[in-house]
Amino acid sequence: MPMRTMLICNRGEIAVRLVRACRDLGVRSVVAHSAADRDGLAVQLADDAVCIGPAPADRSYRNVSSILYAAARVGADAVHPGYGFLAEDPRFVSACEEVGLAFVGPPASVVAGMGDKIAARAAMREAGVPTLPGTDGPVGSLAEASAAAEAIGYPVIVKAAAGGGGRGIAVAMDGSELAAAVADASGSARSLFGDDRVYLERYVVGGRHVEVQVLADAHGTVVHLGERDCSVQRRRQKLVEESPSTALDDATRQRLLDAAVRGCERIGYRSAGTLEFIVDRAGSPYFLEMNTRLQVEHPVSELRSGVDIVTAMIAIADGDALPAELAGVAMRGHAIEVRLNAEDPARQWAPSAGRISRLRLPAGPGVRVDTHLVDGAMVPPFYDSLLAKIIVHAPDRPSALRVLRRALGEVECHGITTNLDFHLALLETPEFVAGTHQLDIADSVADRLTPAATAG
């Protein structure tokens, strides 16, 4: 039976994006929101809305019981988690499956399998996807970690087996730093994910972060929508994403894309997903992890491919097969996304909250803005700092950079502090303009900013 009502259990720009996708498909949308978001744009645009709890996420957006009750109350037959919160929680996926709700995403077994980074490494290795030298299982003691690190070769990175999003990670450049790295990573993993297992991989100094967007249906078809370069990061959180990557030559790009498809076929993937890789200075890519959900940066791939990834996810959850023409979809031009965040790069990326007193967002040829902001909107202190995604598309990278400069020059956001000046400074950084930047570029750009420069 075709999907009729979808519960959107998320907030901010992604909730707005999902409401609009439902409207395009003729699906009734209901936004499940916290008390802090009752006046949000997604609530205003949706067909209906239901409050699922107070502001703290653990009592609302991560409260499985409240969300399932809301779905029953509004007669939903499907749930879309967006990203973050419960999007990669296999227990939530299982709960939806048990009560007969269509989860717009992969099955619980796949979410659980890819959520265990050790199991994910093994599955990708079996599929012929390149992985970094590392341990095949968790390290149970410092002595075991030390022996593994010597075999791998320093520097090494200690990673939580559970979780993701750049958390539960610590680096040891040599043996003197290993004990602290293991303690830091395992302690963070325990508090964040309730699982203190950690494993080791070789640490790639510098390098680039490149990921592949995939779509897979329940009929065995897997396609890719190109790669995205996400190498501008602060504290392993992405700030800028673009496609195609300047770190890959054509042959390496094709090998990477083919490997991503093989990996998805190996695990029986279904829905939209992303395989993340680290590319070393020699240009060799290695698998890091898989995100079994919609990515914040999906518009980059949409603009280059012309494919609506969100409506494709919903169609897949409804049992539809991917259109045959997607297998050979042409990727056109160059796309770049920057995240406008409520944070201050000049003050160690300190978060900002408050009311938007004046807002102007860019428009015009080649510019797309995904946001939930309106004049007078309140930015609460409880959630992620993302305010808006400014995405540009042009025939080539130099043209895209010019459009991005124009777009960022039109932005005004007063009442809170944003990272706008960071992005403007990045566009004047020679390594970024040349496309030769590495993963440490955000810190070097932020170091040049003064506190006064980022005041909103």
Image (cartoon, rainbow, N blue to C red):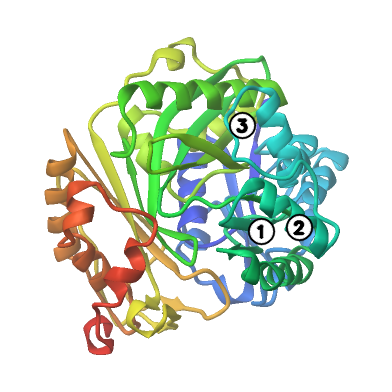
User: Looking at the picture, how far across and down is residue 420, in whole percent?
Assistant: 27, 70
Q: Which image quadrant for residue 410? A: bottom left
> Which residue type does callout 1 highlight?
Val
Q: Disc 3 vs disc 2: which is toward the camera?
A: 2
Q: Name the residue carrying label 1.
A: 158
In which quadrant will I find the N terminus? Answer: top right
Front residue of this view, candidates 131 and 393: 131
Q: Which image quadrant for residue 288? A: top right
Are discs 3 and 2 less than 8 Å apart at CB?
A: no
Which of pointers 2 and 1 lies earlier in the amino acid sequence? 2
In which quadrant will I find the C terminus? Answer: bottom left
Front residue of this view, candidates 118 and 183: 183
Mark 3–mark 2 Cα distance, whole angstroms, equals: 36 Å
Q: Relative to residue 77, is residue 150 depicted above or below?
A: below
Q: Is residue 183 left or right of residue 97?
A: left
> Which residue type does callout 3 highlight?
Ser
Q: Name the residue carrying label 3.
A: 271
Q: Is residue 201 left or right of residue 191?
A: left
> Which residue type does callout 2 highlight?
Ala
| Residue ID at (76%, 41%) | 136
| Residue ID at (71%, 26%) | 267
Q: Name the residue carrying label 2.
A: 145
Q: Say if residue 206 shows up in the picture.
A: yes
User: Looking at the picture, how far across and down is residue 58, in whole percent?
Assistant: 73, 71
Q: Disc 3 vs disc 1: which is toward the camera?
A: 1
Are discs 2 and 1 less than 8 Å apart at CB?
A: yes
Q: Relative to residue 338, is residue 94 depicted above or below?
A: above
